[in-house]
Image: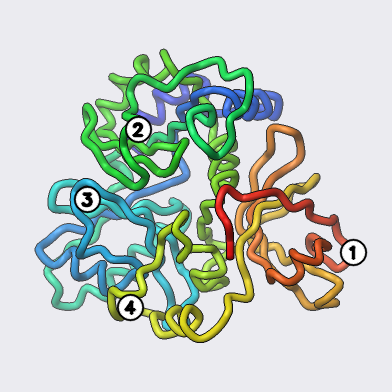
Amino acid sequence: MTQNWTQFLAQQGLETITTAQIQAQLQIAKTSAIVTPLTDLGLIRASGEDAASFLHNLVTNDVVGLDNAAACTAGFCTAKGRLLSIFLIWREGNDYLLMLPREILPPLLKKLSMYVLRAKVKLSDATEERILLGISNLATGSLTRPAGSTLGVPNFIDTTLPAHAVAATEGGQIIRLDDTRWLMSLEPVAAIKRWPEFTASASVTGLDAWHWLEILAGQPRVVAATQETFVPQMLNMELPAVAGVSFSKGCYPGQEIVARTHYLGKVKRRTYRAQLSQFAAPGTQVFAPETGDQPCGVLVSIAPAPQGGFECLVSIQSTVVAAGEVHLGAPDGEQLGFLPLPYPVE
């Protein structure tokens, strides 16, 4: 993020958000169009004539087949098939941009650079080069259709774009993530110039609202506390709604484990949505009577919820979800209340 953008956000009162403001913003996100500066996300740029093949050989999805009009979700795994990161990948001209949490970007950039060797590819931290904005309007899509929507579809987004499509917009690109969410990647000058346009038809929210929308959509992320915890199927990544794994693209680190899980056995752990009254950090273990004092899953992500308390994504054994009793942090911890996802997990 550039210094000018940081100062601009501070001038908009977005540097510090109180608990009361968070709850108000969550209610707005539930019923209206919002725009959120995604300051917790960063970008890695891959450039050079071997960029496509280099990435294709490292991640779980097809990058060689990715054209300028499409984005894809992809995982980067260890040799044991455990996720180090989940990327959203799209093309910007001849380059590729990889979006991921800022907290894990430096070590991931270093790790990816170790694979360059003689490949004609340059990897760089592009976080300062682009401003990332999340846009959502739940009233426009099929995730939920709440009553009382106060704002229509923002006039700066193209609702005809299909999911994972990329289009040009003034000063950058816009990507449709799903039925109700879009991502904008803009040059810093363009983001500041267009801010009045954005706020004329969408309310500004902080990250908590966007994180809740991400959980509502059932879209996982890997953070520092959960690296090397999940194989992709534990986060629903091969399901169409996430679409983060190709089983026809060839080898990549961990591919044998991921393929074996897909072809030879039933996936025992899936990611589900749940509610809690108390906060717990990603990576917190969960327990069930069926597994005693052994954990049956792990918290993936968590955010404040409009109805109060918190909503989370939790990767957990499907059998204990069916039984219905899962506890946070200890066998006698708070019981999770399971909520529906917008897609089937089986």
- Residue 330 falls in image quadrant: bottom right
Give how far apart the Cα atoms at labels 2 and 4 are.
37 Å
Q: Which circle marks residue 91 in the picture?
A: 3
Element type where label 3 sits in the image: strand
Q: Quadrant of the C terminus?
A: bottom right
Specify whether 24 is left or right of 190.
Answer: right
Mark whose residue sits in front, 2 or 4: 4
Q: Earlier in the sequence, mark 2 or mark 3?
A: 2
Q: Quadrant of the N terminus?
A: top left
Question: Pointers 1 and 2 in contact (CB under 8 A)?
Answer: no
> Could you say which is closer to the camera, residue 122 or residue 27?
27
The amino acid sitting under disc 4 is Tyr
Q: Which residue is mark 1?
A: 332
Q: How does the figure colour the protein chain or chains?
A: rainbow
Q: Which residue is mark 4?
A: 252
Q: Earlier in the sequence, mark 1 or mark 2?
A: 2
